[in-house]
Image: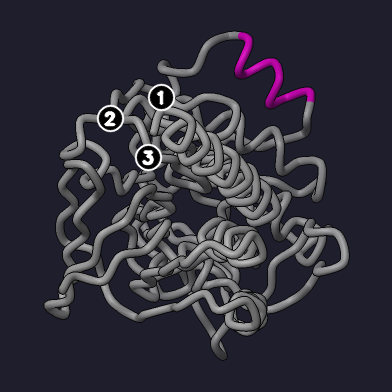
Amino acid sequence: MTEKYAVVVIGGGAAGLSAGLVLGRARHRTLVVDAGEPRNAPAAHMQGYLSRDGMPPAEFLAVGREEIARYGVELVRDRVVEVTRGEDFTVVLAGGRTVRARRLVVATGLKDELPAVAGVAERFGRDVLHCPFCHGWEVRDQPFGVLATSPASVHQALIVSQWSKDVRFFLHTVAEEELSDQDLRRLAAAGVDVVPGEVAELVVEDDRLTGIRLTDGTAHSRSVLFVAPRPVPQTGLLERLGAELHETPFGAYPVVDATGLTTVPGVWAAGNAIGFAEQVVHAASGGYRAASAIVGDLLMTDLDAAVQV
């Protein structure tokens, strides 16, 4: 017989583990399916999470797995390949296991597609960064570069100027004419130097970033480079379930209410599955909200069924 759970949580990052913790403490049989591909894996530390500031992401997840195990929550390292909706949800795992669930939490996150510049992928999470709120303090006052991927990269260049007064904005494949007069005035006011020309590669010496080389051969001494990855939401399962999505400048994400409930009854989403800017602290909070809403939803469903008998 197919195993049945109250809830299957798809994704074992901060959002999924937080949901599992709340569900386990509420005495609901819960399965967390973790593919083991957290978005922040390249980072050595995570910042901005009160009481966990500076904690390595891998350690954070390891502690979370220990905590949910105390409440009988099962965690399996696998990937969900299909979900179908009937009276319950049927969840098929890549390893061949099939389970049923009354409710789902989708916490599948997103993937970052990095600019195709030699050295960027290899240094990402070390001295190639994307979020100054996550890493700005650790690299403060160093010579920054910002790699433009679109005119919207102006915002990133302006934001990072809070952490260094030596910032160069490499236009790369963006023409200077694409920047508005207001963009240029703000960059000048922030002390950000605009550097035209396409970036060819990063200069790395002794396993650290030392410069940015353009295609014309000129090099600029920099020790930190900020980039804006293209976020790729992992919404395949939600789409196949019929969840409504809405377009944002950072991709299409499910329409959810304040608890994370999608337009599919019985399906909640949390973490980067609902938006690009969900940091670890937000993801954990979102998982908590979704799980607490599910606890109430299951209770009322069962009570209403008992009343009708």
Left or right: 9 as drawn, with respect to 58: left
Residue appearing at x 41%, y 62% in the figure? 11
Query: Eyeballing the image, is 201 above or below 159?
Result: below
Q: Earlier in the sequence, mark 2 or mark 3?
A: 2
Residue appearing at x 62%, y 76% in the figure? 71
Q: Secondary structure at mark 3?
A: strand
**In the displayed image of the protein, which residue is found farthest to the right?**
51
Front residue of this view, candidates 30 and 114: 30
Q: Which residue is mark 3?
A: 267
Q: How many marks?
A: 3
**In the displayed image of the protein, which residue is found farthest to the front?**
309
Q: Give the extent of the magenta segment.
A: 182-189
In whole angstroms, how far apart are the C-alphas of marks 2 and 3? 9 Å
Between disc 3 and disc 1, the foreground one is 3
Q: Which residue is mark 2?
A: 243
Query: Eyeballing the image, is 125 above or below 91?
Result: below
Q: Residue 217, image x and y in percent?
A: 38, 59
- Residue 255 occupies quadrant: top left
Three-letter amino acid code at the position of disc 2: Ala
Q: Earlier in the sequence, mark 3 or mark 1?
A: 1
- Residue 309 occupies quadrant: top left
**Contact, mark 2 vs mark 3 (Cβ under 8 Å):** yes
User: Can residue 90 be seen in the rendering of this structure?
Assistant: yes
Residue 153: give its label: none
**In the displayed image of the protein, which residue is found farthest to the bottom?**
206
Magenta-highlighted stretch: main secondary structure? helix
**Contact, mark 2 vs mark 1 (Cβ under 8 Å):** yes
User: Can residue 169 be seen in the rendering of this structure?
Assistant: no
Q: Which residue is mark 1?
A: 255
